[in-house]
Image (spheres, grey):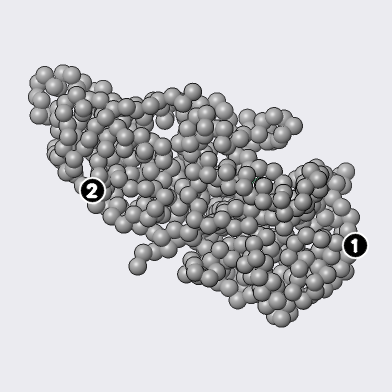
Amino acid sequence: MSKKFFITTPIYYTNDIPHIGHAYASLIADFYSRQKRLLGYEVKFSTWVDENSQKALQKAEEKGMDISDYLDNMAYKHKNVWENLDISYTDFIRTTQEDHKNLVQEVLQESYENWDIYQWEYEGYYCVWCEAFKKESDLTEDWLCPDHLKKPDFIKEKNYFFKLSKYQDDLLRFYEENPSFVQPNYRFNELINFVKEWLEDFSVSRQTNKFGIPLPFDNQQVTYVWYDALFNYVTVCKNWDEKFWPADFHVVGKDIARFHAIYWPAMLLSAWYELPKNVISTWFFTVDGQKMSKSLWNVVEPVNTVQNYWRDALLLYLLYDISIWRDGDFGWERFFDVYNNMLLWWWWNLVSRVSKLSQKNNINKVQFDMSIEKEFLDLAKDLGYDENLFVNMFENWFDKNKIDEYFDTVNINSFIRDWYDIVQLANKFIEEKKPWELLKQDENQWKQTLCFLVYIIKNIAIITSPFLTEWFEKTKQSLWTDLLDFDTSETINDVEERFNSKSFDVNLSPKFLYQKL
Ligand code: MSP
């Protein structure tokens, strides 16, 4: 039986359509999904919308729309974005779905009976933009929410609370037993310190909200956004997909890492569920050094970006040039550098050159001769590349464990850098070898050289297919072999064979398209 992998994105609020900050989590999750499918995992990938929120209700009222029409419309718009970005999700969830409501009520009841939910009179500040209560010490000098610079509401009402404080020891034990539960490590350490200091019980319901899932033990109250939102991850596994729980990766932004790493495990423990394996906490985008905001006209619109340039360029830029782990800046100049230099010049140029040369020389069968490797390695050394890296890569062209390790330690940039080195080297190899001269001296050797290059391209196309999805398709068009005949949004079982094969038929038609604009 194949191994399973369950990855999730945050579910997005529907008061607006997703921008690049939201798309970031979905693109990263998409990349991991394709990567795992390539390694033969059966993948479940869930995403979509968080609907039971005050913000959506306010927006519908502003527009004079009925809330359910508004939500249907926004859910459709969100789906459209993910389809345009070619996100290979397997499950879409809306939190107004009947099965989700039932599950949330079931777990609330369970925790209530477990004495983990109790009623209390609450008086304090509430920021509807964060959907969170705020302490006075959390606010700015002008009494604004520091994240949204908006005035929070002052609220006095009866709420139900979840006894988070009861789970302090359980959480600390769990963290100790699972030292990579939250990545990156520095974020995990911050969260652990937070839990060690003091855990405050949190509100799970609102009395004044009209919209949401009613508490099963008090239908005058509806559940508060986090209880409702987080359990979406379990709803998608109910009925026919239970084997996928617990989730392997929750990809989340740093602002909601706390909810996923602290509240979520405690809520699950209280309702007797297994805990998720990893929370991947990403950073916040600024654009050209400024906070992304509509009033500054600098919101990066993901669908336009992939339509005007390439999806590959966006992925390459996000995964390689910006680290997942630090707060980073989306810089258009760097984006164009990656787009022109790495993608068009190095990666794409390689395929178009090799397919043209191979076509000219009637290469239709690749029989790869080991002796060429040595020359390639010599050239790598001459050009100052690290010898060990190349020896390793050529000896283990495909090593499943090594690749899994790269990704499980979330070392994506170094993975891409290694493959980019090979692409650059292959281009330089063509220049140094001077095919036209070689052809005059030894036609056979020249054919061998081309076969070797086709072999390299085939392998690079396979290994980078989880993020360079367009390059993969274009490569197939220019340099067709059965070994590249697979769909990256589906699980494949024979990747090692496709990768290691040194004898295969090729069909060349060099019609590589460079520019989108
Ligand atoms: N609905 C909640 C999540 C519930 S998950 C059980 C929510 N929604 S959100 O639409 O406000 O945000 C979704 C994700 O987008 C979060 O992970 C958030 O961090 C991310 N981003 C929103 N703006 C962002 C940037 N400017 N940069 C990077 N990511 C940011 O929170």
**Residue 95 in picture, x, y percent from top left:** 66, 59
Q: Which residue does the image show at 24% across and 52% down from the upper left?
A: 497
Q: How crowded is mark 2: few (under 14 residues within 10 Å), some or many (20 or more)?
A: some
288 up-or-down from 280: above or below:
above
Query: Looking at the image, which is closer to me, 205 or 287?
Result: 205
Q: Which of the two residues, 331 or 470, is positioned nearer the viewer here?
A: 470
**Which residue is found at the position 71% from the left and 51% from the top?**
69
Disc 1 marks a residue whose amino acid type is Lys
Q: Looking at the rendering, which quadrant does residue 98 occupy?
A: bottom right
Q: Which amino acid does label 2 sit on?
A: Asn
Image x and y of residue 422, in percent: 32, 35
Q: Is residue 199 above or below residue 309?
A: below
Picture quadrant of residue 266? bottom right
Q: Are marks 2 and 1 in contact (CB under 8 Å)?
A: no
Q: Is residue 486 visible?
A: yes
In the rendered view, does 292 fall on the left or right side of 500?
A: right
Kindly identify the residue that appears in the image at 32 percent across and 40 percent down.
460
What element does badge 1 sit on? strand
Judge from the rendering whether residue 55 lies leftward or rightward of residue 399; answer left or right. right
Measuring from the top left, give residue 255's x and y in whole percent.
67, 50
Q: Is residue 359 left or right of residue 491?
A: left
Q: Earlier in the sequence, mark 2 or mark 1?
A: 1
Determine the residue positioned at 80% across, 52% down. Answer: 127
Quarter of the picture containing the N terminus is bottom left
Residue 392 seen in this snapshot: no
Q: Check disc 2 and report its element: helix, strand or loop.
A: helix
Q: Characterize the local packing of mark 1: few (<14), some (14-19) or many (20 or more) Cα atoms within 10 angstroms.
A: few
Q: In this view, does 304 lie above or below 95?
A: above
304 vs 279: above or below: above
Label 2 belongs to which residue?
A: 500
Residue named by callout 1: 156
